[in-house]
Amino acid sequence: MQQSQTPGTTFAGLLAENRPQAAAWVRGGAAAPRLSGLVKFYDTIYGGVLIETEIFGLPNISSQGSSDFYALHIHETGDCSHQFTKTGNHYNPAGLPHPQHAGDLLPLLGNQGYAWGAFYDKRFQIKDILGRSVVIHRNRDDFTSQPAGDAGEKIGCGVIVGNP
C-alpha cells in the first residue's frame, strides 16, 4: 500500500532525525527539584514550528498510576533566576487576550511524573522565541482566566537557545 506524504508523516520524520533548530533544557526550582527535561523546536515546511516535550520529575511522580495536567508556556524573557520570577509575562507579540498568546502552548499530561508530547504551532517562528523561556506551572491552564490562565506557581524553566 502506497502512503502519501502528510504533515503527520513529515513531522514523524523530523522527530526521527532529532535535529531541532532550538531547544530549552528545563530544570525544576525549589517547588519541584526533581523536574528536568527538554523542549525541542523544529522548523517545518508548513511555515510553523513542531514542538516536542519530554519532561521527568513532575510533582505527581510519587503517586502510583497518577496523571495530572501542567501548564506549558513561552514567557517573554530568558531569565530563569530567582525561582523563575524574572521570566516576564507570556510571549504575546500581538497583544491578544489569553489563551490566544503566541506563548500559550498545549498542556503537559504528566503520568506519574513523566510527560512526552509533540504538537504543531503556527503562531511564531523559531527566530522569534530564541532567548525567551519555556515555563512549566504547577497547575493546568484553565484557558479562560485573565491574564494568564490561573496556572499557578512556576515549577520549571529553561531558556530557548538555537542550534542545540
Image (cartoon, helix red, strand yellow):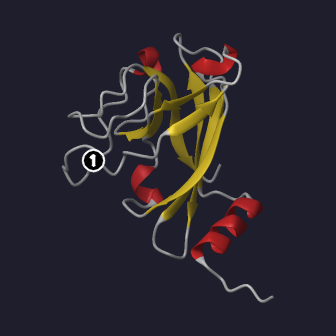
Q: Secondary structure at mark 1?
A: loop
Position of 9 with respect to 77 (left or right) is right
**Vertical placement of residue 55 versus 29, above or below:** below
**Vertical placement of residue 57 versus 118, above or below:** above
Position of 14 with respect to 98 (left or right) is right
Identified by mark 1, the residue type is Asn
Residue visible at 28% across and 34% down in the picture? 148
Q: Which residue is mark 1?
A: 92
Residue 39 shows in this picture: yes
Q: Residue furthest top?
A: 30
Residue 37 picture location, percent across and down: 65, 34
Residue 159 picture location, percent across and down: 51, 37
Q: Residue furthest bottom?
A: 2
Residue 52 shows in this picture: no
Task: Tell me which corner region of the image, top left, top right, bottom left or bottom right, holds residue 145.
Answer: top left
**Vertical placement of residue 17 versus 97, above or below:** below
Residue 75 picture location, percent across and down: 37, 38
Residue visible at 37% across and 36% down in the picture? 77
Residue 87 picture location, percent across and down: 37, 29
Position of 151 with respect to 81 (left or right) is left
Task: Tell me which corner region of the image, top left, top right, bottom left or bottom right, holds residue 73.
Answer: top left
Q: Nearer the viewer, residue 84 or 72?
A: 72
Residue visible at 75% across and 63% down in the picture? 17
Q: Residue furthest front?
A: 65
Q: Residue furthest right?
A: 1
Residue visible at 52% across and 12% down in the picture? 31
Q: Nearer the viewer, residue 81 or 13?
A: 13
